[in-house]
Image (cartoon, helix red, strand yellow):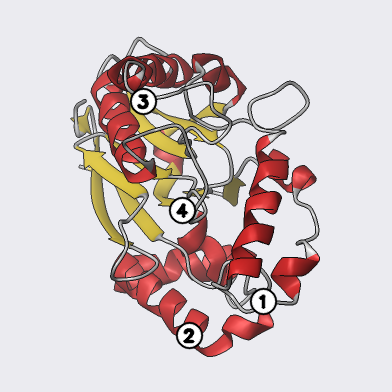
């Protein structure tokens, strides 16, 4: 992928942090001279079987590297690049793993690619892409998963985080969520089914209209869409002035100080890639 195509150049910086220092980061981020990818792996609750001997972090990295390689084929649409990446990773572990298991590893995918005088994008599931355009900010995020969020079981609401009762409720919650994954009328993620790629949100914008793009896992976007402490404009300004590492640091500060105010996961892997575009 050319980083300087005709009269435009792309400058990229990124940061990624696991939810806790003693666990694997299940996010993935990569950038080339003309594209960027952020992937957020769907974690498996402690004690729950996934049917895979490799794990979510392995899956995120494997599909990320495979996608980046295929994005170099500029004539290939991004959804087809992703479908081929899913097939490649499926073939890597189908001999050792039960890919029909409802807990088989999965992930979101957010990608951009310079392609001549345009910028192609793809968003599968709820890791947002924020585009800073000439006349507006455009946020592309697949919210279909939100329709299947259910109230937490009483065992999660009424017992301490990490207790046996809490973990049992979490497994129940995840099982319900999985029943709607990659089925018609449900929501779509990267996993073992290449057809999921066709359900991604895709599009293209003139490269001349793009000043910046932010690719975010939902652990990095939560200052806006969970905590409500920043606007998307604020987030872009923070990335532009202080960089992705500062965004992640602020997320961690808020998580530490306000964890009990917000339901759900107190900490999450957080990844942000910030891309600036300019004329040479």
User: Quick check: 264 left or right of 176?
Assistant: left
Q: Is residue 195 above or below residue 63?
A: above
Residue drawn at 73 percent across, 30 percent down = 186
Position above or below: 163 against 256: above
Looking at the rendered structure, the secondary structure element under dot 1 is: loop
Quadrant in the picture for the C terminus: top left
For mark 4, what is the residue?
217
Q: Nearer the viewer, mark 4 or mark 3?
A: 4
The residue carrying mark 2 is 256
Image disc number at residue 262: 1
Looking at the rendering, which quadrant does residue 34 occupy?
Answer: top left
Contact between labelled residues 2 and 3, with CB atoms less than 8 Å apart:
no
Report how far apart the C-alphas of labels 4 and 3 lie in the structure. Answer: 27 Å
1 vs 4, front mark: 1
Quadrant (top left/top right/bottom left/bottom right) for the N terminus: top left
- Asked if residue 101 can be seen in this view, the reply is yes
Give the residue number, with chain letter if any, for mark 3: 117
């Amino acid at each position: 992928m050319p980083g300087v195509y005709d009269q435009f150049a792309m400058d990229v910086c990124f940061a990624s942090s696991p939810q806790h220092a003693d666990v694997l980061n299940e996010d993935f981020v990569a950038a080339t001279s003309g594209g960027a990818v952020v992937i957020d792996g769907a974690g498996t609750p402690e004690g729950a079987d996934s049917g895979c001997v490799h794990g979510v972090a392995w899956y995120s990295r494997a599909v990320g590297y495979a996608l980046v390689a295929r994005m170099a084929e500029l004539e290939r649409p991004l959804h087809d690049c992703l479908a081929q990446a899913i097939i490649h990773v499926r073939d890597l572990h189908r001999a050792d793993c039960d890919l029909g298991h409802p807990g088989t590893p999965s992930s979101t995918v957010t990608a951009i690619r310079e392609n001549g005088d345009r910028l192609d994008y793809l968003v599968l599931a709820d890791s947002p892409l924020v585009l800073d355009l000439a006349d507006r900010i455009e946020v592309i995020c697949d919210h279909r998963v939100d329709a299947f969020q259910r109230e937490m079981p009483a065992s999660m609401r009424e017992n301490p985080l990490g207790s046996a009762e809490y973990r049992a409720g979490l497994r129940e919650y995840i099982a319900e969520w999985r029943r709607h994954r990659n089925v018609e009328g449900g929501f779509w993620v990267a996993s073992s089914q290449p057809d999921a790629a066709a359900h991604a949100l895709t599009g293209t914008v003139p490269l001349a209209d793009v000043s910046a793009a932010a690719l975010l896992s939902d652990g990095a976007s939560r200052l806006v869409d969970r905590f409500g402490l920043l606007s998307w404009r604020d987030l872009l300004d923070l990335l532009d002035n202080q960089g992705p590492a500062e965004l992640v640091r602020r997320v961690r500060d808020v998580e530490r100080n306000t964890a009990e105010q917000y339901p759900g996961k107190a900490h999450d892997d957080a990844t942000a890639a910030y891309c600036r575009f300019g004329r040479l």
